């Protein structure tokens, strides 16, 4: 059964329609790459999945529960869905460990000791076990982004959303972040990611979804989709990424 199910999702900002009848099922453990030109609605789609944006029509169901705009539902959802953005938004005045454990103590009421154990585990997962006591400014952009990923993992999400998490990074720093994401995928994490890294999408994604003007224009396994793009829009998009 799909862990994320969107059916007929519509979303507008005033007169601007951003999502038009978007339907998408994501299987548990699947990696779905959302690709498409800037403004095609990718970020909005991600934000609708975890309730950061209310939708105007259709429905979003995550793990069998309909996403509703009420406090209880959203609070629950945010514990279950990790989201990582291009900007890492770490607290500069807190250590790496504290950045990772903050939500654990505030939301999950974990003790400092329990929190530390979780921090050790997730920071190991992203290769930063030795940076527990460091402050964000002492880390590279790639390392800060890996801390942001670890902070999400600490909440033991059922689903991870990534919105262009490597876009602000230099090429060599991109790689270390992509490697972490590839590891997560291999361990079976369900992931929906917006990315411009086509090689990564080809290699790691189970499904690639090409968004165009607020619609899913093409979708399928990368092996087929990239080899045999069906529409001129997707062909053009692929050409623009080469
Ligand atoms: P993408 O991530 O594919 O670049 P977005 O989902 O960010 O696309 O944006 C889709 C469209 O919606 C764009 O035209 C953008 O300007 C518009 N948009 C996004 N967020 C808002 C907002 N909060 N208010 C008004 N317009 C928005
Ligand atoms: Mg975007």
Image (cartoon, rainbow, N blue to C red):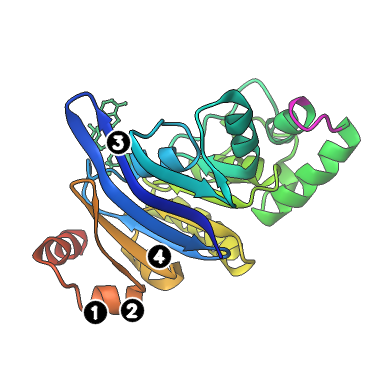
Q: Which residue is mark 4?
A: 200
- Mark 1 near mark 2, Cβ–Cβ under 8 Å? yes
Does residue 78 show up?
Answer: yes
Q: CA distance from mark 2 to mark 3?
A: 31 Å
- Mark 1 near mark 4, Cβ–Cβ under 8 Å? no
The magenta-colored residue range is 106-110
> Which one is earlier in the sequence, the residue at label 3 or at label 1?
3
Q: Which residue is mark 1?
A: 227
The label on residue 11 is: 3
Task: Count neighbours of disc 4 (C-alpha within 10 A) and say few if under 14, some if 14 to 19, many if 20 or more.
Answer: some
Q: CA distance from mark 4 to mark 3?
A: 29 Å
* In the image, residue 109 lies in the stretch drawn in magenta: yes
| Callout in the foreground (2, 3) | 3
Q: Position of residue 75 (x, y in %)?
A: 63, 30
Residue located at (22% from left, 40% from top): 39
Label 3 sits on a secondary structure element that is strand
Q: CA distance from mark 1 to mark 2?
A: 6 Å
Label 4 sits on a secondary structure element that is helix
Residue located at (36% from left, 45% from top): 167
> Which one is earlier in the sequence, the residue at label 2 or at label 3?
3
């Amino acid at each position: 059964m799909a862990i994320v199910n969107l059916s007929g999702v519509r979303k507008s900002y005033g007169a601007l329609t951003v999502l038009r009848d978007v339907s998408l099922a994501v299987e548990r453990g699947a990696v779905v790459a959302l690709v498409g030109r800037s403004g095609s609605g990718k970020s909005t789609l991600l934000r609708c999945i975890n309730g950061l944006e209310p939708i105007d029509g259709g429905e979003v169901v995550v793990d069998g529960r309909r996403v509703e705009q009420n406090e209880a539902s959203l609070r629950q959802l945010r514990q279950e869905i990790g989201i990582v953005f291009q900007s890492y938004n770490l607290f500069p005045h807190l250590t790496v460990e504290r950045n990772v454990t903050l939500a654990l103590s505030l939301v999950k009421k974990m003790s400092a000791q329990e929190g530390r154990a979780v921090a050790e585990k997730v920071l190991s997962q992203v290769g930063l076990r030795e940076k527990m006591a460091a402050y964000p400014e002492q880390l590279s952009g790639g390392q800060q982004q890996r801390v942001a990923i670890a902070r999400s993992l600490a909440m033991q999400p059922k689903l991870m959303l990534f919105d262009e998490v490597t876009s602000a990074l230099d090429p060599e720093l991109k790689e270390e972040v992509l490697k972490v994401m590839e590891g997560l995928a291999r361990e079976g994490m369900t992931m929906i990611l917006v990315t411009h890294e086509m090689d990564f999408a080809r290699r790691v994604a189970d499904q690639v979804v090409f968004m165009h003007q607020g619609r899913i224009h093409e979708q399928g396994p990368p092996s087929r989709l990239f080899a045999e793009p069906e529409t001129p829009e997707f062909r053009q998009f692929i050409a623009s990424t080469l």
